[in-house]
Amino acid sequence: MDGESGPRPGRPAPGRLPAEVTSFVGRQHELTALARLLAGHRLVTVTGPGGVGKSRLALRAAARAAGAFPDGAWLVELAPVRGGRLLGHAVLEALRLTDGTARAPLEVLAERLAGRRLLLVLDGCEHLAADCAELAGALLRAVPGLRVLATSRVALRTAGEHLLTLAPLPVGPPGPAEPPAPAGAAALPDAVRLFADRARAVLPSFEVTAANAATVARLCRRLDGIPLAVELAAGRLRALSVEQIEARLDDRFRLLTGGDPAALPRHRTLRTTIGWSHELCTVQERLLWARLAVFAGGFDLDAAEYVCTGEGVDPDDLLDHLTELVAKSVVLRLAGPHGVRFRLLDTVRAYGLQWLRAAGEEHRLLRRHRDWFLGVATWGEVEWFGPRQAETAERTALVHADLRAALEFCLTEPGEEQTALLMAGTLWFYWVGCGHLGEGRHWLDRALALAPEPTEARARALWVTGYTATLQGDLAAARPALEECRRQALATGDDRALAYAVHRQGCAALIGDEPARAVELFEESLWHYRTIGELNSNVLMAMFELGLAHLFQGDLESGELWLGQVRELCEEHGEQWAYAYALYALAYAHWLRGEIRPARTLARESVRLNHLFHDLLGIVLAIDLLALLETEPAGPGENGDLHEARVLQGAAHRIWRAVGRPFFGSRTFNGPHRACEERAVAGLTEQEFTDSFATGARLDLDAAVQRALGGGGYPDDPGPRPGPGPLPPPAPRPSPVGR
């Protein structure tokens, strides 16, 4: 989240909290207490048993408090995060912070949040309590303006933590005397109000009346006022009356307690209620519930059909069973831009997973889950080369949590190491094209360490590792990986791996300021690609990189010839990602020829397209080039704008901090930036030089893109900013150099 240093008039507070889809009932006392704790303390944890409403209370409190935090309130959902090693990556992703460096996520977070004032909601910490405590403690020490609101069934047990223990909803006075007929909703206990509200969702005519008030109150007391239990019971009104629900729950409690409902602990009350919902399901619905529990995040109908059908669940009946589980409040239905998706509440999912294990099906379902998401990765790689690239990026992001779960299964299940290599390598398009270089390296490094055998899957993982490391400016890691891939390919006759290894060695040479050597390697790789009949985004990138290498050597004719081919092929196939890079290089070629106006047009289109993919490298290269173009008059009678050039340099400097080493540490790639800086030094006062850079460095990513596109300081759309980042220190002022 590359946010500004403070709020701006007319723009809402930034952040990302989900909209409430059902009404919020009661909890006014707890909200007041939580607001008081957040106002006075930097780490507050809401604790309580499952289903008591910790997440809902925390989100309502965060939404109310968001105005006090110029950089907003941000939710990090931790239930899908299976291990502590991914906690930092999950926080970065939730904050919309893209980081392509090889640094540890915690280090990146501390740097990018420095100087920010924001509220971080860590929801569902209990399975990662120690890791969350470490992360929260480190960030609170590093970022004075940060406050953390956590929810967990257990305390984090770290310094400075203040607890709010959440009790169930009030259910009214105990004993034989029941409440009189209600005079209005406000007169009802909160648990009864919640039951009535959720009941109307399935039975719109439902009201708490003098005739049923006593029964509803008894039912809510029997459920201990646990919100999730009350909601599940209310969902039964679709088929049962209140009296029937109470009677059936009585029977179940009596079985568990020998006839004394008071003997049932609250955590057993929720489990019993969920278990009763389970018993009301058909055999096939129970089986589907258990199998759906393997999904770490949301899922669509196609995924559910592949993973969950067979051996008791007929594919033709799955939709009917899933519809019934939605009607029974077991599964949530979520409508979005990519169609309808579903998910299980964490407590309900945990219950289903226990049944899956008891049935001895967990391993088989986890393997089917892995197979499906390996297919998602494979199909995503295919779809990446074509007109659906942007949609592929969005769909892959939707299933990120389940891709992580599938990779973790491969890395922890003996015998699955080769599949881990294959999957981590196949996702190169997501790691590279969608801003996840750091996480990609995490999975690739782990997989390579587990499987040293010279297989085709290892070769792929090696060149992808070399590719990601090169883009991070980490040539010390890239070169050995690519050389191992090349040698293995030669030894095993793997022509495809050889093509990719040589190609990425060309990238390393280009970034390592060896353009002549890069030309040789790119030409060799393209010969290999032609020989094996390969044509995809990687091949187009090799052509772009070859054209750029020619431009860096001053050979405009050869460079433009290759870039023209890239442009034609991209337009023919609807490819936009490589196209955006080709436009950047063509803009550079126009600048070399002194053609400023077309250079600006192409560079701006490159920024716009790369922004669709959240490809920070493509964005920042084009913005740095636009900064140089601002120093040039676009036509007769026009002047360059050195102030704007320096603003764009400041914006680019901030983005480079997220990408990795500025310009990969390359003198060649740094050329346009250096030329722009020299002109700004010569034409601006020292104060103007510094202030203009600082103005740009305060722009978040969306604002920087809008500025580069000629739209002024900030986007017209005041939607959520992509997250806070520090105001980077200005680059050292160089000695004055004439134009």
Image: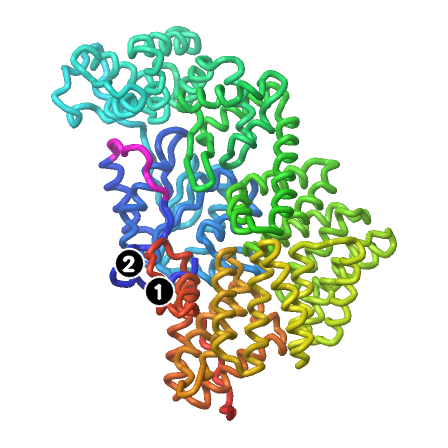
In the visual, does 636 lie left or right of 395?
A: left
Q: Is residue 265 above or below residue 252?
A: below
Residue 23: in magenta span:
yes
**Quadrant of the image occupied by residue 84:** top right
Relative depth, front residue between 564 and 727: 564
Picture layout, residue 545 above or below residue 283 = below
Residue carrying label 2: 11
Q: Looking at the image, which is closer to me, 144 or 184?
A: 184
Residue at figure coordinates x 44%, y 70% from the top left: 651
Q: Can residue 148 be seen from the camera position used here?
A: no
Relative to 431, does residue 700 appear above or below in the rendering?
Answer: below
Nearest the viewer among 552 and 298 is: 552
Q: Quadrant of the N terminus?
A: bottom left
Determine contact: label 1, label 2, CB under 8 Å: yes
- x 25%, y 12%: residue: 215
Q: Earlier in the sequence, mark 1 or mark 2?
A: 2
Indicate the position of residue 664 as horizontal and vertical percent values: 61, 70
Mark 1 Cα within 10 Å, few/some/many (few <14, many 20+)?
Answer: some
What scheme was used to colour the molecule? rainbow
* Res 275 → quadrant: top left
The image position of residue 444, as x and y in percent, is 67, 51
Residue 714's label in the rendered image is 1
Residue found 47% across the figure and 60% down from its top: 110
How far across and how far down the image is residue 698, in percent?
Answer: 39, 69
The residue stretch that appears in magenta: 18-27
- CA separation, marks 1 and 2? 10 Å
**Residue flagged by tag 2: what amino acid is it?**
Arg
Q: Please name the residue shown 67% across and 39% down the image.
A: 410
User: Considering the numbered disc 2 on the image, is that residue within a helix, a strand or a loop?
Assistant: loop
* Label 2 environment density (alpha carbons within 10 Å; few <14, some 14–19, many ≥20): few
Q: Position of residue 50 (x, y in %)?
A: 41, 29
